[in-house]
């Protein structure tokens, strides 16, 4: 089949990585998958022109509101993949929720990353029961073997001579829902007590106005550094070398950075929100915090308790191997794609 795949494709973001991985799964089954950024289209009419020009048979969208709404009414079968924004934000706005409900009426199938996402979607749109499947993100990490950690520390303006250096890494696009400033004040105070601890925020500048706010805040914060977006292989190498991965988001669908850290045997400290709690079991596969002060307490505990660190690292790696198999994800999407084939039953 000739498939159109719509997704948000900002470079080096979770959405882009997920979309490209799913595209690879579909193309491995022999389909031609044309991946396009939803932000390049303003209306369904533009999608209609693309469908005609490329002689497309079916379509897929990552995010029901951003992408799915552009696929309505074109008389070609399509499937959708829920994003965190769909259920954590857009579903709470009546107009967007109604649009997403209509998308689900037309879609042959929908994919949720977790059981809790599926349950939330079925509660919001009862008519979609029976067409929502659960498939966790598959994880493959590929650290750049040639990456130089010392050079990264220099780029981050981190003193390598600091006693007991511990780098905490926060990976996120600079936008409010990721809340990169949530821990800055508390971390800065901690750094002044223990100069060897640093928080490094890595990610693309998604929201220009908010980015200016983040840069201004970080510039004044001791022990906090901001680094721009990086290629995935380099980012994986940074994760592998840091002391711990941090997530402070207000909402998440499923954080690829958390799963990648687990796969790379790096401990995770994550904000206690539903999307993170679906992946991180407190004191088993990682540590969950509810406020900045608790984050500092847990981070100190992790630094002083090597046995705890070893245990959550081992459990996290095993969790990813059991529940986030790249091969299982491939099999699922290749199977679902058959529902889009001409003559298939809805």
Image: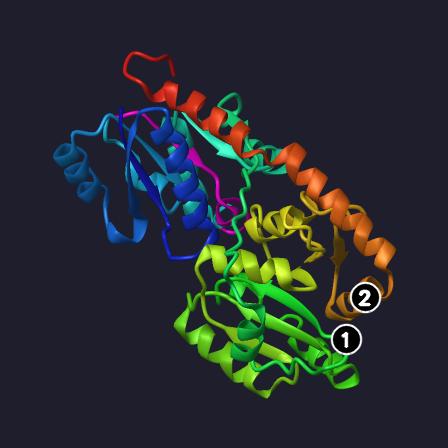
Q: Which residue is mark 1?
A: 164
Using the rendered image of the protein, determine whether residue 240 is visible from the camera's viewpoint: yes
Q: Residue lying furthest front in this view?
A: 146
Q: Which residues lie in the magenta part?
A: 76-89
Q: In the rendered structure, find residue 304 and report the number of the disc placed on it.
A: none
Q: Quadrant of the N terminus?
A: top left
Q: Write the residue at 76% across / 43% down.
A: 315
Q: Which residue is mark 2?
A: 303
Mark 1 touches mark 2? (CB < 8 Å): yes
Q: Write the residue at 60% across / 59% down.
A: 239
Q: CA distance from mark 1 to mark 2?
A: 10 Å
Q: Write the residue at 79% across / 66% down.
A: 294
Residue 176 located within the stretch drawn in magenta: no
Is residue 283 positioned above or below 48 on the image?
Answer: below
Q: In this view of the protein, which residue sits in the foreground, 107 or 219?
A: 219
Is residue 299 positioned above or below 255 on the image?
Answer: below
Q: Is residue 162 left or right of residue 328?
A: right
- Closer to the eye: label 1 or 2: 1
Percent coordinates x, y for residue 225 in the rendering? 57, 77
What colour scheme has been applied to the protein in the rendered image? rainbow
Q: Write the residue at 43% across / 40% down.
A: 21
Percent coordinates x, y for residue 276 in the rendering? 66, 50
Q: In this view of the protein, which residue sits in the foreground, 218 or 96?
A: 218
Residue 309 quadrant:
bottom right
């Amino acid at each position: 089949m000739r498939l159109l795949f719509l997704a948000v494709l900002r470079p080096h973001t979770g959405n882009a990585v997920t979309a490209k991985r799913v595209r690879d799964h579909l193309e491995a089954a022999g389909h031609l998958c044309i991946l396009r950024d939803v932000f390049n289209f303003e209306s369904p009419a533009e999608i209609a022109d693309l469908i005609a020009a490329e002689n497309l048979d079916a379509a897929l969208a990552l995010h029901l509101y951003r992408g799915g709404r552009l696929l309505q009414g074109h008389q070609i079968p399509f499937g959708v993949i829920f994003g965190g924004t769909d259920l954590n934000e857009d579903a709470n706005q009546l107009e967007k929720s109604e649009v997403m409900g209509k998308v689900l009426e037309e879609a042959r199938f929908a994919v949720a990353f977790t059981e809790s996402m599926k349950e939330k979607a079925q509660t919001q749109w009862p008519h979609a029961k029976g067409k929502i499947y659960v498939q966790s993100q598959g994880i493959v990490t590929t650290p750049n073997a040639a990456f130089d950690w010392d050079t990264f520390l220099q780029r981050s303006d981190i003193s390598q001579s600091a006693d007991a250096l511990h780098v905490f890494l926060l990976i996120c696009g600079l936008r409010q829902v990721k809340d990169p400033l949530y821990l800055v004040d508390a971390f800065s105070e901690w750094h002044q007590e223990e100069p060897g601890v640093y928080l490094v925020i890595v990610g693309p500048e998604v929201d220009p106005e908010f980015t200016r706010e983040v840069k201004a805040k970080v510039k004044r914060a001791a022990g906090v550094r901001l680094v721009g977006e990086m290629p995935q292989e380099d980012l994986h190498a940074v994760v592998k070398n840091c002391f711990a991965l941090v997530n402070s988001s207000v909402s998440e669908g499923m954080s690829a950075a958390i799963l990648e850290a687990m796969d790379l045997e790096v401990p995770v400290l994550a904000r206690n929100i539903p999307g993170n709690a679906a992946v991180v079991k407190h004191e088993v596969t990682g540590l969950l915090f509810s406020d900045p002060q608790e984050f500092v307490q847990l981070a100190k505990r992790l630094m002083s308790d090597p046995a705890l660190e070893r245990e959550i690292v081992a459990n996290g790696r095993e969790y990813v191997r059991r529940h986030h198999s790249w091969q299982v994800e491939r099999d699922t999407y290749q199977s679902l794609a058959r529902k889009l084939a001409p003559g298939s039953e809805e």
